[in-house]
Amino acid sequence: MYNTVSTIHVGTPGLGKDMSGSRKRWRKIAIVAGSFSVILALLMLSPYKTTLLDGLMLEANAHINDLLKSQDSFLASMPEGINGVTSTDFVPILVSHSEDSDPLDAWFERSQTEALLVQKNGQIVYERYAQDADRGRNINGMSMAKNIIALMIGIAIDEGKIQSENDSVSHYLPEIVVTNNEGLTIRDLLRHTSGIQSASEDLSATLKGKGLVTPLAEISFAGDRAFRYDNINYHLLNLILGRIYKQPLNRLIEEKLWFPLGLEDAAIINSAGYCCLFATARSWLAIGNVYLNQSNTVVSSHWIEKMINDTVTPEWFFVQATGESVGNAYGYHIYSGLPTLPETFWIEGMGLQLIMINRKTETIIVRLGGIPSKFNITSNRNEATLIEPLLKVLAQ
């Protein structure tokens, strides 16, 4: 069914630039936020609250991703370059596509996808890009950057820079003091079980190339260690790596991952650690192969298995790939929990950035792009799941 590598360029709708400055952008944020507040209040009275809230979360992710998807987003600083190799084997095969030729083609057209790769048994069997995607390099991988940070922590353990994921955070960030509980570990940060109480201004500052507004000594942590997804957990991991290696994040990634794997030029916002890596879809595919191939040489297989299997399953945790908030498992920024494909796990970022891996069928799928609004009647938003064709490919 998927026996040719094919590339086609299609147009991707943008936000429009008919109004100058940031006034239009902030007006859009205000309108979206106000609308969601009203809808949320109504949903709390509905007997279908969980289903409706899940739909609202997906809609929110669609709009927030729109605001952060490009390297010149007004919400974030410009990313720093990650030097890589120049690709010599990429020769796009321009062929005609139609909605009847392949289910993936039809899905691509309706899902706001900008880059889609399928690898089967080590061979790329499907490849397609939108016109301005630069093969994925113009697309923000969003929280998939967290997975890169988790890999870097494993590399630091392999190199003896960190003894284990059970090390105390205060050993590396001595400014952090956790009252009544000295058990805050690197593992807690990786799994979002630190109990961190972060502030919105810290998120805004670190996205814009600055440090935390809240001094490390003043960060507070809840004592219950319940799962609470918070970006600043991975910012603290980024700080730990910076102190250990005394290098900025882009140079660390370049040295420890990009050059050893032979990946192409990329870019990342150094100050975040939880977001914003811009890379080609083939580079993300190579990251997926680190999990598929136990013989990878960049990080120990023991750490890879721990990233996948040391999971927490919260009572409520919305995940875009499943479209639901119940039954989702989270490792070291590795997701699982598909009832029909229990052997499948994936890396996810806002806007449905995905690397989905099925070791049983030796399949990897990379998907980059956005999420269509619920109000886009020509999109796939009214279907049972956003990624049904991808799940079928993973199972084959």
Image (tube, rainbow, N blue to C red):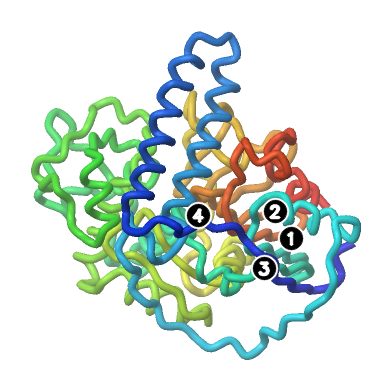
Q: Name the amino acid type tagged 1.
A: Glu
In the image, residue 356 sits, relative to residue 385, either above or below, namely: below
Q: Quadrant of the N terminus?
A: bottom right
Q: Residue 129 carries which label?
A: 3
Q: Name the amino acid type tagged 4.
A: Leu
Question: Nearer the N terminus, badge 4 or badge 1?
Answer: 4
Kind of element beneath mark 1: loop
Category of crowding for the residue at label 2, using alpha-carbon neighbours closer than 10 angstroms: few (below 14), some (14–19), many (at least 20)? many
Q: Name the amino acid type tagged 3.
A: Tyr
Contact, CB < 8 Å: mark 1 with mark 2? yes
Query: At x 77% / y 67%, what residue is drawn?
Result: 126
Rendered image quadrant of residue 254: bottom left
Question: Nearer the N terminus, badge 1 or badge 3?
Answer: 3
Gap between marks 2 and 4 measured at Cα = 35 Å
Query: At x 56% / y 66%, what residue is drawn?
Result: 284
46 lies left or right of 172: right
Gap between marks 4 and 3 measured at Cα = 19 Å
Kind of element beneath mark 2: strand
Question: Nearer the N terminus, badge 2 or badge 4?
Answer: 4
Camera-near label (1 vs 3) is 3
Q: Which mark is residue 362?
A: 1
Contact, CB < 8 Å: mark 1 with mark 3? no
Q: Name the amino acid type tagged 2.
A: Asn
Contact, CB < 8 Å: mark 2 with mark 4? no
Gap between marks 1 and 2 measured at Cα = 6 Å
240 lies left or right of 100: left
Contact, CB < 8 Å: mark 4 with mark 3? no
Q: Residue 15 carries which label?
A: 4
- The residue that disc 2 covers is 358
